[in-house]
Image: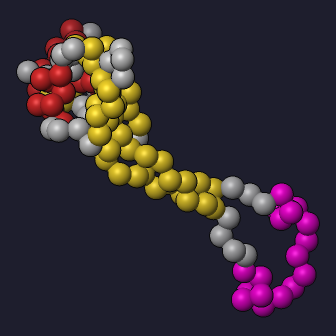
Amino acid sequence: MYKFIFFFLFLVSCSDILYNHDDTMSMLISKELVVEKFGDPTEITKTKDYDEYYYDFGVFEERVNYFDPQISTVTAQPKVSEIENEFLPQFRIKVSAKYVKFRLVGDKVIYWESQNVNFPTKKK
């Protein structure tokens, strides 16, 4: 039992432990830290209550499978050549934005949001 505990502690101490994306983003509590991490924003929106820093990282394309309800996998198909029996692929490409958004009041981050990005960091 003790060997297992020591072995586990050895593995944990030698591995590269990372802060996950949510932890990393939550550590960005000031405008200075946000700009240091991501640089100048793609777009700044100023409202009466806060400023919004938007960082655009392009788009994320994902192949999404779907099935046409008119095609049945249960019914028998007549015997035809392979070429005549080919079906068009049943998928579509879903395109989603990749971005990070921060809302700031003065120099303080009050809210962050991200989509299709992952920014883990090493613990110091």
Is 124 located above or below residue 72 in the figure?
Answer: above
Q: Residue at x 15, y 38 (%)?
A: 39
Is 98 located above or below residue 110 in the figure?
Answer: below
- Give the main secondary structure, helix, strand or loop, of the magenta stretch: loop
Q: Residue at x 14, y 23 (%)?
A: 33
Residue 98's spot in the image, x, y percent? 38, 44
Residue 79's spot in the image, x, y percent? 87, 85
Q: Nearer the viewer, residue 54 or 93?
A: 54
Image quadrant in which the C terminus is located = top left
Q: Nearer the viewer, residue 114 or 44?
A: 44
What span is colored magenta in the figure? 69-86
Q: Is residue 27 magenta?
A: no
Q: Residue at x 18, y 22 (%)?
A: 31
Q: Residue at x 27, y 19 (%)?
A: 104
Is 88 located above or below residue 106 in the figure?
Answer: below
In the image, taking residue 50 as reference, residue 93 lies left or right, namely right
